Amino acid sequence: MLVIRFDPTQYNYILAGEEPYFVLRFPEGGSLVSSARCLHRGGPLHLGEWASADQCLMCPWHGTRYSKKILAKRAVPSVENKGLISMILDVSPETSVRLYKRTGVADPLCGRDS
Amino acid sequence: MTKYQASAADAVLEGARSASNGLQLKKVFQRDPEAVKECIQLYADNPLFGATEEWTTEDDPYRRAVRPHVLKYIDFTKTLARREALNYSALAAQRLLLNIYESDLVFLPEKGFASKRKDFELFYSQETKLLGELARPILEDHVFSFLDKEVSVSGKWTPAILKSYLDDLVREANQSESRSVAAILYSPDRERTASSFLIQLMMDFLSEASAMIRNVGGRFGPIQSELFKVIVDEYGYGVHDTKHSTLFERTLESCGLEAQTHAYFQFYLTSSMALSNYFHYVSRDHSKFFRFLGALAYTEATFSHTCRQISEALRTVFGAKADTRYFDEHVHIDLHHGRMVFDKIVVPALEKHGDIIIEDIVRGIEEFRLLSEIAESDFVEQSDWSDRGLEYKGLTEPLLERITSGAVKCRQGTYVEPLGELSITHVHDADELCLVESGVMDFVTGHDRKVPLHPGEGTILLHNRLHGALITSKEDCVYHIYSIDDYKACLS
């Protein structure tokens, strides 16, 4: 297992080995960490569009829609407290981790991160 | 029946009979701010909770000053944000909650029961209990609901992930240094700072595991018996001299403190009460049982490391006279308790009840961690403020200059108080400047921590810092309070 702890205001995109993840923060509070690969064709889900009216995330490649409920169900186990997110991955603790602040990442809290 | 009991009972009965007279129960349940104020005021008007002329309480576990005259200005139906967790309404609510929770526990004085019997009866009276129970959920929401917002758990957790996460947290905690212990060791007044720290632990340690005991009743299978084993350890297997609270009494006495229940009630910091009350909060309401397990698993797994640091610090500060057996015992036994709680309680609970309970367990871990961090900061800041009393006193003149020159505009109030008038400890939500015009006041920032203020002298009351005052001059003391909001901004 690997525990990754980070400040979501500083980082919104995580590479653990070659696997990409991104952070979604919600205006009503709470956050989740999702795989950045779309289930459909592996599109860059983190660059999707958050449709606040429908409360869903749309993949930029083929428009596959993920409701908040589905995102929560598929989310990486994580907990946010004291301004930090801790995410836990079932991978070797030796796995390399890179944290990024990427622009254009979908963000229900403030629209698209820029 | 005392006058208080009669009026409280009348109000409750009247409220039960009529929606238009007396205490309006329906409106309390609906959390109408005025009805809630009335309910809490009735509870706090209990003579046990009123004014006192002493900083400490001598062997009367029922006397707990809550400054009832101020409560009418507080809307407890509003919930506090994290940044407000040390504000005055939080201090008031935590004091009230401590008293409410502890009316379920048995406290007896060391001696002289006959002279305290009325206090005993009043503390445990049905009127006090009933009013307290009406107020309790409102006060709990006021001070604890921010935890729901601050902690967010998501994703699909499994028992293995939970174990890895807890192991990681424990590893991190066990490599860190206690900021409270550092505050003691680096304080220019180490003995007083260490004493203040021990006082913060008293409300929990002298009735140790009392909140936990709320969770051993009922019927919930083998984990019930495992939880009981932890409690049996805490209670020294029925041998009083080895009961953990007995060991802590020896620690207090060896460091020159009284070991009587709530002798230093006025010097409990808001955050220290929050930590102790939290365990009652998640134990009094059994729907929070799994949160309780999470908090217990974390604290048992990390307490050993904390105790090692405290034990060393007490020996450094007080020398060989410090009886540190309480902390030394926990260095040893909590290594077992950490394992016992996770392997014998948490894991079997997960196997039996499924992953659905993990979110509550994680929440309990995180809520306790958050409250612990707030408590560390609170103690460190309070100690620093106390240590730098003269420094803050010295800022009076430049601040006053800014005010009198008109550079700083602020509200000002003037107060006159007689010899012996004791202002029960409290906090302010913003910085204030206190200036004595005539007479003498002892400005108090902790047990045995005071700065005398003579005419023309003053000090800065930092927001959220606990303080009180005692007039020591024969002549009345006239002093001014300037609401300066942020003293640094005023000086810049």
Image: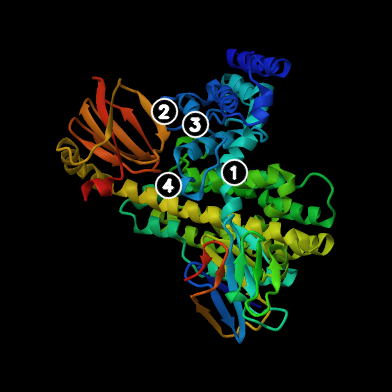
Label 3 packing within 10 angstroms: few (<14), some (14-19), many (20+): some
Residue under disc 2 on the same chain as residue under disc 1: yes
- Quote the CA–CA distance across marks 3 and 4: 32 Å
- Return the residue at label 3: B74
Which numbered dot is residue B195? 4
Which image quadrant: the N terminus of chain B? Answer: top right
Q: Badges 2 and 1: C-beta atoms under 8 Å apart?
A: no
Label 1 packing within 10 angstroms: few (<14), some (14-19), many (20+): many
Q: Chain of mark 4?
A: B
Q: Nearer the viewer, mark 2 or mark 3?
A: 3
Label 4 packing within 10 angstroms: few (<14), some (14-19), many (20+): many
The type of residue carrying mark 2 is Glu
Front position in the image: A31 or A86: A31
Residue at 41%, 38% (x, y): give it: B427
Front position in the image: B277 or A20: A20
Residue under disc 4 on the same chain as residue under disc 2: yes
Residue B235: x and y in percent read: 68, 48
Q: Earlier in the sequence, mark 4 or mark 2?
A: 2
- Quote the CA–CA distance across marks 4 and 1: 21 Å
Q: Earlier in the sequence, mark 3 or mark 4?
A: 3
The type of residue carrying mark 4 is Ser
Which numbered dot is residue B54? 2
Residue B49: x and y in percent read: 52, 26
Residue under disc 4 on the same chain as residue under disc 1: yes
Q: Nearer the viewer, mark 4 or mark 1?
A: 1
- Return the residue at label 1: B277
Front position in the image: B114 or B63: B63
